[in-house]
Amino acid sequence: MRRRRLIAAGVVLAVAAAAAVVFAGGRPQRRLVAHFSRTVGIHEGSSVRVLGVRIGEVVSVTPQGRTVRVEMRYDADRRIPAGAQALIIPPSVVSDRYVQLTPAYNGGAALSDGADVPVERTAAPMEIDDIYRALDDFNRALGPGGANADGALKDLVAAGRANLEGNGDNLHATLDGLDRALSTVADGRQDLFGTVVNLQLFTTALAESDQQVRGSTSSSPQWPGSSPASATSWPPPCAASRRRSATSPRSSGRTATR
């Protein structure tokens, strides 16, 4: 009885040890390091995805000078293109921020284990503070210390008001006529496209028959038995000389004397 208990205990311990090894080792993984300009919302444990499918997680986030080093691990059976980019995707209703590796692998070279993605191939979403800062910079650029330092912006607004004042009906008629013209073009777009296509076919046919057209325009009539050199002159030299001798005064005088 005691022997059976020892055997059972040994089997349980062996199974437990095997399970511990399996769960401790887990699936084989690859390591990837990416450098971001900022990593707001990314922390250890954030998911790493391809096309929205989780393939790994962030292991560490470490500031390095003016960039942030993010180390990730993903399943070794997942292949990532050698020129892949790492993007931080903003949170949605059902998920927090995560790192997206794009594009999906479609053949060719793949990232090796321990690959490094430079900051030029990473991107982070714009924060609300960045938007406010951009709007503030725009307002300052148009303010008294910027474009309107000498009243240029004020003069521009005043000139626009002077030009548009009392011209509301004309402006309305112009916009209405432009709308009708664009509508006419849009309604006849099929005919317009057909004309362009036919013109393209015509020019293509001319280009393909360029040699035949050149041959037909450069050809000239030839007398039977004449050489190619004499075929280019019209009328033939002998005929021209006979015509000149028949009409010259000297030859007519001799004929009359005889």
Image (spheres, rainbow, N blue to C red):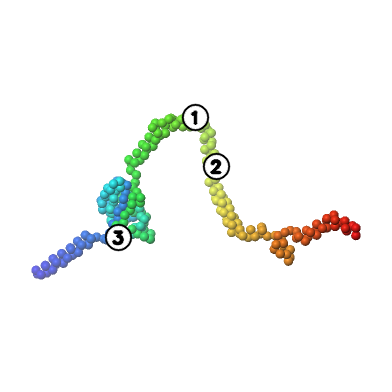
Number of residues whose C-alpha sits closer than 10 Å to that of mark 3, classed few (under 14), some (14–19) or many (20 or more): some
The label on residue 181 is 2
The residue pinned by badge 1 equals 162
Answer left or right for 245 relative to 191.
Answer: right
Q: Earlier in the sequence, mark 2 or mark 3?
A: 3
- Residue 178 visible (yes or no): yes
The CA distance from mark 2 to mark 3 is 61 Å
Quadrant (top left/top right/bottom left/bottom right) for the C terminus: bottom right
**Label 3 amino acid?**
Ala
Q: Characterize the local packing of mark 1: few (<14), some (14-19) or many (20 or more) Cα atoms within 10 angstroms.
A: few
Q: Quadrant of residue 22?
A: bottom left
Q: Nearer the viewer, mark 2 or mark 1?
A: 1
Rendered image quadrant of residue 142: top left
Quarter of the image with the N terminus in it: bottom left
Label 1 – label 3 distance at C-alpha: 70 Å
Q: To which residue does mark 3 refer? A: 76
Residue 218 or residue 156, whichever sits in front: 218
**Residue 34 image offset from top left, x and y in percent:** 31, 52
Asked whether 218 or 15 is in front, the reply is: 218
Give, as a three-letter code, the residue at label 1: Ala
The residue closer to the viewer here, 162 or 120, is: 120
Under tag 2, what secondary structure?
helix
Which badge, 2 or 1, comes first in the chain's sequence?
A: 1
Pointer 1 or 3: first along the chain:
3
For the residue labelled by badge 1, is the local secondary structure a helix, a strand or a loop? helix
Dots 2, 1 in contact, CB < 8 A:
no
Q: Please tell me which residue is depicted at 51% across the width and 32% down the height of the picture.
A: 168
Q: Is disc 1 in contact with disc 3, using a CB cutoff of under 8 Å?
A: no
Q: Is residue 82 left or right of residue 224?
A: left
